[in-house]
């Protein structure tokens, strides 16, 4: 019997597995894909994510400070004072994190889909093809479409949806190497992006409305507007919507997308997957080593993560109420961009950002043109 079974070898699962194995615990990760499994993702690793990855040699990345925010034919070019994010190839990041977990002592079982979970008072059992795996605790980290999500929330929640493809054309890379493009012209609630990586461009679009939307059509229009060729392939995947969920179900803890830890304003989820994977590992280690209750995990995730995500959810509603007005305000008041991106970089909390925005609003500064 393993000490811990982790379902899902994405950022949340690999992080939990690495930290638990590092403490000498017997850990197995069940991953339904192979070692080069591709998760649909733009691969922006924010400053919030980086502290959880200390000591890990990350795959090649671009570190950009320039952002162009586009609405119709109006553009704001903003240069951040600090690094906003590292742009990595997501499959390479996942491989790196799984290898780090393996190096720490965790066993990774690829091509092993968890089919069913059974929770008992003294153990957990996961059914896989050809048998079952038993453990003392379980981390459900199988993402937005996995099987453990259902343990924590009874009704299906509305989900955002994103679509991403990659372009490998050297001329296009040269043309778009210097800046991140965010285009808010195409959807009533969502944006299209272009993120330059070392050897490719990530292009995609995300809709936060939760309603059916012709995502592929808008994606194509965005690509055409940049005069780029269509990516050879693209993938679509849901982003779970924020909802209060049960994170501790008997001996099982849910982490990452399996429990909807995604920023509804930007779509960022890797940092929260790593953060919750870290907290899950700490809660299980302390239950095993000191006999403490797992309930502290729920409290900590609510305090450290949900509290922030609730604010990004409000930001999302406010920003998309009138996107043209949001763009107009940002054009006149570019320091708000710095406020936002320094928060993404992890230099302040979303609660501090919200307070700052409130103060600026109350003082009526949003409507005045800022001196440059
Ligand atoms: C289009 C798009 C773009 C995005 N861009 C960004 C971005 O730039 N930056 C960012 O921070 N976030 C981004 N996100 C969000 C981010 O991808 C997720 O929040 C993040 O991947 C969550 O990590 P996770 O480990 O919880 O789940 P996942 O990364 O989804 O990992 C779950 C793992 O579980 C495995 N699995 C699933 N079911 C089973 C099963 N039954 N048995 C065994 N294994 C199973 C899967 O194969 C997968 O490897 C984006 C999302 C989308 C859809």
Image (cartoon, rainbow, N blue to C red):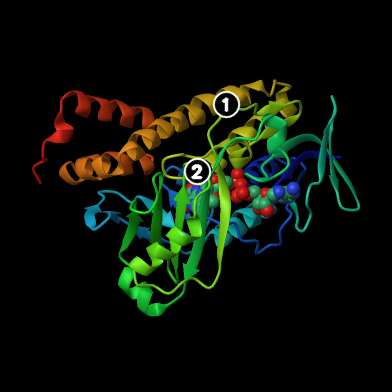
Look at 45% across and 55% down and name the residue there: 205
Q: Tell me residue 349's x, y (percent).
A: 38, 32
The N terminus is located in which quarter? top right
Q: Which mark is residue 13?
A: none
Q: Tell me residue 84's x, y (percent).
A: 35, 50
Q: Are marks 1 and 2 in contact (CB under 8 Å)?
A: no
Q: Image height check: is 296 above or below 48?
A: above
Real-space Cα separation, disc 1 to disc 2, in angstroms: 19 Å
Give the label, 1 or 2, closer to the camera: 1
The reply, left or right, for residue 123 in relation to residue 197 is right
Name the N-terminal-most of marks 1 and 2.
1
Q: Residue furthest left?
A: 371
Element type where label 1 sits in the image: loop
Look at 22% across and 43% down and name the residue there: 330
Is there any visible trace of residue 349 in the rendered image? Answer: no
Residue 255 is drawn in which quadrant?
A: top right
Element type where label 2 sits in the image: helix
In the rendered image, which residue does mark 2 sit on? 271
Look at 18% across and 41% down and name the residue there: 333
Is there any visible trace of residue 27 in the rendered image? Answer: yes
Asked whether mark 2 lies closer than 8 Å to ligand 1, one says yes
- As rendered, which of 134 and 229 lies closer to the eye? 229
Q: Residue furthest right?
A: 130
Q: Image height check: is 233 above or below 8?
A: below
Look at 57% across and 48% down and name the residue there: 238
Residue 280 is drawn in which quadrant?
A: top right
In the rendered image, which residue does mark 1 sit on? 244
């Amino acid at each position: 019997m393993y000490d811990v079974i982790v379902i899902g070898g994405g950022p949340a699962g690999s992080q939990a597995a690495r930290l638990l194995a590092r403490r000498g615990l017997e850990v197995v990760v069940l991953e339904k894909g192979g070692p080069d499994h591709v998760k649909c993702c733009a691969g922006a690793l924010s400053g919030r994510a980086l502290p959880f990855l200390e000591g890990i040699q990350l795959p090649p990345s671009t570190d950009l400070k320039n952002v162009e925010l586009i609405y119709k034919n109006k553009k704001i070019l903003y240069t951040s004072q600090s690094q906003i994010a590292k742009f990595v190839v997501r499959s390479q990041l996942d491989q790196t994190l799984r290898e780090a977990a393996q190096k720490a002592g965790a066993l990774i079982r690829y091509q092993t889909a968890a089919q069913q979970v059974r929770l008992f008072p003294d153990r957990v059992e996961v059914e896989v093809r050809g048998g079952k795996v038993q453990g003392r605790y379980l981390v459900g980290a199988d993402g937005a479409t996995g099987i453990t999500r259902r343990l924590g929330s009874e009704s299906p929640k509305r989900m955002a949806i994103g679509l991403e493809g990659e372009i490998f054309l050297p001329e296009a890379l040269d043309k778009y190497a210097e800046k991140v493009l965010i285009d808010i012209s195409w959807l009533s609630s969502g944006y299209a992006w272009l993120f330059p990586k070392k050897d490719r461009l990530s292009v995609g679009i995300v809709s936060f409305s939760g309603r059916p939307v012709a995502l592929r059509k808008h994606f194509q229009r965005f690509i055409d507007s940049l005069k780029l060729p269509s990516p050879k392939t693209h993938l679509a995947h849901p982003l779970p919507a924020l909802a209060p969920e049960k994170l501790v179900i008997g001996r099982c803890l849910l982490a990452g997308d399996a429990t909807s830890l995604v920023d509804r304003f930007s779509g960022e989820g890797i940092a929260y997957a790593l953060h919750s994977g870290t907290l899950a590992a700490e809660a299980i280690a302390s239950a095993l080593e000191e006999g403490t209750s797992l309930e502290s995990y729920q409290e900590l995730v609510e305090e450290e993560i949900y509290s922030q995500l609730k604010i990004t959810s409000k930001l999302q509603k406010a920003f998309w109420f009138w996107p043209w007005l949001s763009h107009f305000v940002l054009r006149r008041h570019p320091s708000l961009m710095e406020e936002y991106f320094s928060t993404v970089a992890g230099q302040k909390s979303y609660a501090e950002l919200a307070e700052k925005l409130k103060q600026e609003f109350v003082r009526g500064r949003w409507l005045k043109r800022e001196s440059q």
